[in-house]
Amino acid sequence: MCLVLLNHGEHPVYPLIVAANRDEFYERPAAPAHIWEKPEGLIAGKDLTGGGTWLGLTQSGRFAALTNVRKPDIPPPPGARSRGGIVLDLLDDSLPMETTLERLSVHGNQYDLFNVIAGTPGRLLYETNQAPGSFREIPPGTHGLSNAMLDTPWPKVELGVERLSRIADDVCPIDPDVLFEILGEAEPFPDHRLPDTGVGPDLERSLSPLFIRMSGYGTRCQTVILVDRDGRATFIERSFSDGTFTNEERFTFQIRKN
């Protein structure tokens, strides 16, 4: 997952609005979004190599999403654990999310660099193993996360946040298609606006759009989540291959109150 845009705790109808792109190598196998048997009630795609997921929503209302961190000069730790397991742990109703995040703050060095957002509609938390003491509650409003820390002003993050903010301020009810339009922006940004993450200007340019299309790598799926204040949830995932739409999975349900 390489881009997560969200608005939470602010919209008059939707306490949680999520629009996210997952970027990955095309050859890495994955299953589209489906209802998992364990954790029970989880809706998410599945990484068939590591066994975890990059983003999910449970029928009890737990949400979590993870991105990696683009720092090629920092190698993963020996025997690094799969980061997709972090999302599964956070979406397991048998443990408080805070407990799982506190464990991550202690054992985060067992993973390659990551960011994770987790919570329930109206309350979201952020954790990363890039720097100590990063665990915090995300304030209400519109936020963006790519492959640096939360709200780092990369051009794709700034554009996504600006467009999502405009929709959240002016549109009600929200048509999921307008969120997919944001995620489909495939125009690279000019070189003078690109971050310098150590991968060279050509790759920085290719990775700069919200929707990435490269040889062997790109945006594999897009996810839109809308949860209203009555607990009605919509989860839509659209999959792509080499930049071409292939299928859509859609789920609507009432969040269970514990």
Image: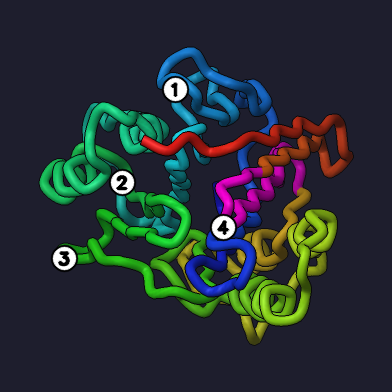
> Toward the viewer: 244 or 121?
121
**Quadrant assignment for the C terminus:** top left
Disc 4 packing (10 Å; few <14; some 14–19; many ≥20): some
In the image, what residue occupies the spot 68% across and 26% down?
Answer: 32
Disc 4 residue type (three-letter): Arg
Rendered location of residue 90, percent (x, y): 33, 38
**Magenta part of the chain:** 214-233
In this view, which residue lies farthest toward the top? 37
In the image, what residue occupies the spot 77% across and 35% down?
Answer: 239
Residue 223 included in the magenta stretch of the image: yes
In the image, what residue occupies the spot 25% across and 54% down?
Answer: 129
Marking on residue 75: 2
Indicate left or right for 174 with 101 as reference. Answer: right
Q: Earlier in the sequence, mark 1 or mark 3?
A: 1
Between circles 4 and 1, the one closer to the viewer is 4
Q: CA distance from mark 1 to mark 2?
A: 18 Å
Disc 1 residue type (three-letter): Gly
Q: Secondary structure at mark 4?
A: loop
Indicate left or right for 237 with 9 as reference. Answer: right
Residue 55 included in the magenta stretch of the image: no
Disc 2 residue type (three-letter): Pro
Rendered location of residue 49, percent (x, y): 50, 19
